[in-house]
Amino acid sequence: MSQSKVVGAVEIGTSKISILMGEITDGSELNIIGHTSCSSKGVKKGVITDLKAASNCVHAAIMTAEENTRIRIDEVYLAQTGSHLQGDFNVGTTTVSASDSVIRAADIEEAKKDAKRRRLEDSRTYIHHIQNPFRIDGQVFDNPLSKQGKRLEVGYWSVHGSSQVVSDSLRVIRGIDLDVGDIIISSIASGAVLLEEAEKENGTLVIDIGGGTTDFVLYRKGYIVLTGVVPVGGDHITNDLSIGLRIGRKSAEEIKLKSGRAYYESEDRDKKTWLYGDLSIGDREYSMASITKIIEARVSEIFEIIKQTLTDRNLLTPGDIASGVVITGGTSLLKGIDATASSIFGLEARSSVGPKNVAKELQVPQYSTVLGLLHYALTGQDSAPSKPKSGGLLRRLSSILSRSNM
Amino acid sequence: MIGRDRQKGDTFASGAQSWRALAGPRSSRVGSSAARKRRWIPLLKLFGVLLLLLSIAGLLYQLVKMLDRDARQAVASVAVNPVERTLFYTDGVLTDDWLQNIIGPQEGMPIMEIDIFALKAKLEKIPQVKAASVERVFPGDLSIKITERKPLLRLLTQGSDGKRRLRLVARDGLVYRGFEYSKSELKRLPYLLPYQNPDKSYLPILGVDQVAELLDLAGNMRPELLETWQVVSLQYFNGKTGLPGQVIEVRSSLVPKIVFGASKDFALQMDRLIYILDYFKKNGDPSLKRVDLSLRGAAAVQLSSGRAQFF
């Protein structure tokens, strides 16, 4: 008899909440069975600021998704973002214990343990320990087992966040009697589904521009070497337009989507654009130059912050990022954003079109994070397979009833 | 479906400082109306299904109980119904009065209190009754059907008190006291002289089936001839047709003694008898004393005059 588990991928974003439901059969096959998204409340810059409002919103979205599919979610995979997320690169070393200098599993574990040894402040919690390649006496190896050497090193990019913020996210999900199977930071989730293996090997910078934050992840030689969050997103562009053009946020959002471009060009000086374009009351003309200059300033700021982060860590080497920059998230739909990124980073840049092997309505940048969560639900983060959860009789009966009557 | 390629290098965080250790107490969860709805709806549905199942079980129990009560009431009401009529059917001569004498009046008795099996046994103990069936026909009739034995011969017996009694012999050899037969019907039956065992006993009477065959054949071939037969004697026939000298003797008003071979072909013997009687009727109709049909390949006729003739 086949075992199946229904997984809900939940992204609590600043401007919207996205939920994807996937059914994992026999731990090897994943089918997307439903999705829903709605406007977010109680979230600022990716961080829950009003627990009650956020809970109401997330719970209603989960209920809607379950009612649409008539199936109950067993477990949630949760995306995490926000400027509270930070990363450190820690190196663990060990002297090979065997007299014949052959590296054994115990040596590898010792090196890994050493890399993860750093204690955080009590207010911080680890979200990922991302392993980087091993080095044996300075030489790089993916798998050092049975190789010979004297000194084994392994690097870990450790992502940690505020315990309070992460705990709030967990409380929201647990408030609807669901368990959180895993937390994945948004940039890693997006990168998992947007990039081919070859692109990860060649080196790619993935930038996910959401409403309130921008998450990024850098892949080199297949490994995640850097992640980060910039507390600026598409909503800031809208806000800038609202202030700069002296219009409401709604109008600013509309003009951003309709006429916005991520860079200014000299022809914009003579161009005008209508707010609505239907000559209705309140419809006004705006200078394209004003619009593009405002947007370019904010987009450039985001990219410059990321560039500075990479430069500070000496990671902005074009040879190691041969596949260039991939931009995703809702703001990646902004015209000319790839050109702006390309000019700032000095790399090839493209806007992501989303994974091709999913339904058409999901092939949009807004769903790349939740799709990535489902990817992790299927593949897992570690080599240990997750145990199928054995529900009690009441739970199973309730599940059957929900599936049949919902 | 999303691809299965695993990220190079694991990303898993575990240990005391990982987010997995942040599980707060249950009371720290943040609820909402949707969460309450999600929590309660399955339980309410479960409760509803259980309630439905209990209701169905309760209804079934009530239904079974009601049916059982109705059945009991029906049986009880039938049980107190009195017998209004006794319906009597027979293929013979027995009458309602005879039945009343045997079983007594049944009318007025509660129909379910009548022991129909005892009545059947009682009736079947009477030799004239070959088989009997007794049925209750609701609401108030008692039906009694009887199959009677048919008499073939008459038998005069003498009891220890020296009195002679008339008994009847059925086709299966059973000797019984006949009831309700008319005198004319009994008069048609020839008397039987049974074979006597060395101890002078004559029961059971054997060979009656051969006699029945002979009488049936005679009745079919020449009914007026059968009517002249007065006595059938089995004094020289013990029922074993394989033994030599086994004969059935018939005393008739035409011929004092007609001897049939017990193991021979009765049809051939009857043909010869009819021929002989017709022959003598055409030839002066002399008085015949004895016709012996038991001889092999011939029949011997002895006239009253003492002359004998073979056919």
Image: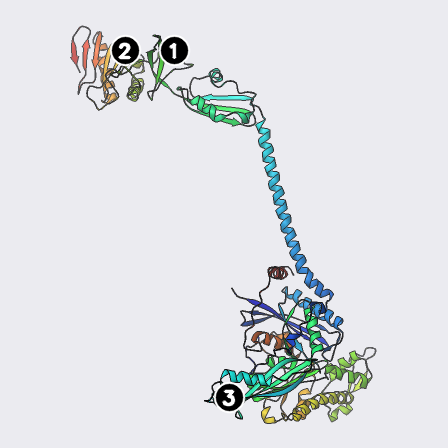
Quarter where residue B310 is shown: top left
* Earlier-in-chain disc, 2 versus 1: 1
- Residue A398 point in image, percent of width and height: 63, 60
Q: Nearer the viewer, mark 3 or mark 2?
A: 3
The residue under label 3 is: A96
Classify mark 2: residues with Cα within 10 Å, few (<14), some (14-19) or many (20+).
Answer: some
Q: CA distance from mark 2 to mark 1?
A: 18 Å
| Badge 2 and badge 1 both on one subunit | yes
Quarter where residue A318 is shown: bottom right
Q: Amino acid at mark 2?
A: Ser
Image quadrant holding the C terminus of chain A, namely: bottom right
Tell me, for residue B252, which label it has, or none: 2
Q: How is the image coloured?
A: rainbow
Q: Chain of mark 3?
A: A
Q: Is residue B174 placed above or below A231 in the rendered structure?
A: above
Specify whether residue B44 is in view: yes
Q: CA distance from mark 3 to mark 2?
A: 139 Å
Q: Chain of mark 1?
A: B
Q: Is residue B183 placed above or below A64 in the rendered structure?
A: above
| Residue closest to the eye, A342 or A271 | A342
| Residue closest to the eye, B1 or B301 | B1
Q: Is residue B87 placed above or below A209 in the rendered structure?
A: above
